[in-house]
Image (cartoon, helix red, strand yellow):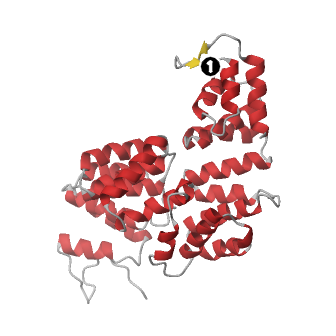
């Protein structure tokens, strides 16, 4: 509400009676029109963003950047929203509203550790307590910290939740189970009304492709993309769907759009690299595998995948070099030693007459 009145104040102070143009050539509406927009149930975010683009400069108050970040976030332009909120946090690093938005943006950009750190800095009010606990639980699940997620979920008062939140609560509980299996009760609870919730949308699209017809899935997803063309998650689901139905070229274009809408994202790079590898484009696969940082939880698979790419490209020198260097770090991973024996004809020497560079001798 505070943001709404602030925008109204800025419009009142800066808009003239005549329409103007922003840097993209879009006509900025007159004051009366914008005031009407701000009083409707569904604010036209892009119009407000265009106006804020026009009035914000380097010397503007940090709250204007927060306001633009908020509208960018609501229009699902997470990468741009993150630029603004980071600018805000430099001058106001302890404001709860700013930290909350920064955490939400980090969560949607799949920077889960960062999101968890932001949420832990917030002292939630009674009104927002369940909301913060949901965010903490979701970030913890994404980091495979199921015990921690369960701790946060146990603090939520279920009776106070809306119907949609109760469905989401059940989903998070299900994901925290030791061996989560498809739960028909959860699927049945995802009706058309609850699908208006972005959290439930993403859970459904993440899992529904194997539980519904491809035709229905495609229509549902395309409708959502039409409503939210800036959402990188929807475009990622679309790329996966196209890959599943063997539309390689279209899937490649979709993945390129997703790549541009995220910041550094190791899990996305692993997914795109695996997509190219599956379609035998090993050079492109290596391009994405090379971007992955060593601290990724599944990083142990990356050198193996890169080694396989080098082998399929016929580059046995890099292939052997990769396996030799990785074996020094991943001493207990026998895949590299076995592949070297398979492709270079190296056999086990029980008498250790010839010592192999990959063989780890244990006392």
Q: Quadrant of residue 324?
A: bottom left
Identify the residue at horizontal 71%, vertical 75% (top origin). Answer: 154
Quadrant occupied by the N terminus: top right
Of 199 and 191, nearer the camera is 191
Above or below, 119 relative to 63: below
Count the numbered circles shown: 1
Q: Quadrant of residue 333?
A: bottom left
Identify the residue at horizontal 52%, vertical 16% (top origin). Answer: 25
Identify the residue at horizontal 36%, vertical 57% (top origin). Answer: 217
151 to the left or right of 341: right
Number of residues whose C-alpha sits closer than 10 Å to that of mark 1, classed few (under 14), some (14–19) or many (20 or more)? some
Residue 303 placement (x, y as % from top left):
37, 63
Identify the residue at horizontal 44%, vertical 76% (top origin). Answer: 182
Residue 135 placement (x, y as % from top left):
66, 60
Furthest residue in direction top, as rendered: 18
Q: Quadrant of residue 315?
A: bottom left
Quadrant occupied by the C terminus: bottom left
Q: Secondary structure at mark 1?
A: loop
Of 287 and 27, nearer the camera is 27
Residue 322 placement (x, y as % from top left):
33, 61
Above or below, 328 relative to 91: below
Residue 273 placement (x, y as % from top left):
34, 54
Of 191 and 308, nearer the camera is 191
165 to the left or right of 232: right
Of 66 and 238, nearer the camera is 238
Q: Identify the residue under disc 1.
A: 29
Question: Does any portion of residue 355 appear in the rendered image?
Answer: yes
């Amino acid at each position: 509400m505070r943001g709404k009145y602030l925008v109204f104040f800025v419009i009142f102070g800066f808009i003239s009676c005549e329409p103007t143009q922003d840097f993209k050539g879009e006509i900025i509406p007159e004051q009366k029109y914008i005031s009407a927009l701000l009083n409707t149930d569904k604010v036209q975010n892009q119009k407000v963003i265009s106006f804020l683009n026009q009035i914000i400069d380097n010397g503007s108050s940090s709250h204007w950047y927060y306001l633009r970040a908020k509208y960018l976030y609501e229009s699902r332009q997470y990468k741009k929203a993150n630029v603004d909120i980071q600018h805000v946090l430099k001058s106001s690093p302890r404001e709860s509203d700013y930290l909350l938005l920064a955490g939400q943006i980090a969560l949607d950009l799949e920077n889960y550790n960062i999101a968890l750190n932001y949420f832990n800095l917030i002292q939630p009010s009674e009104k927002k307590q369940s909301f913060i606990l949901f965010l903490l639980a979701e970030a913890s699940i994404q980091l495979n910290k199921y015990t921690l997620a369960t701790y946060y979920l146990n603090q939520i008062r279920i009776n106070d939740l809306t119907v949609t939140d109760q469905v989401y609560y059940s989903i998070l509980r299900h994901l925290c189970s030791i061996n989560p299996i498809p739960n028909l009760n959860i699927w049945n609870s995802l009706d058309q009304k609850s699908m208006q919730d972005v959290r439930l949308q993403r859970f459904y699209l993440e899992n529904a492709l194997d539980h519904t017809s491809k035709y229905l899935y495609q229509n549902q997803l395309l409708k959502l993309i039409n409503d939210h063309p800036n959402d990188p998650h929807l475009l990622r689901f679309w790329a996966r769907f196209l890959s599943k139905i063997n539309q390689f070229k279209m899937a490649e274009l979709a993945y390129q759009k997703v790549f541009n809408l995220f910041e550094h994202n190791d899990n996305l790079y692993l997914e795109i690299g695996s997509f190219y590898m599956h379609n035998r484009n090993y050079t492109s696969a290596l391009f994405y595998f090379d971007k992955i940082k060593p601290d990724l939880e599944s990083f142990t698979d990356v050198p193996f995948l890169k080694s396989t790419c080098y082998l399929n490209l016929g580059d046995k020198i890099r292939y052997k070099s990769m396996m030799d260097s990785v074996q020094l770090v991943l001493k207990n991973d026998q895949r590299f030693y076995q592949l070297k024996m398979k492709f270079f004809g190296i056999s086990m020497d029980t008498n250790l007459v010839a010592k192999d560079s990959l063989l780890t001798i244990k006392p």
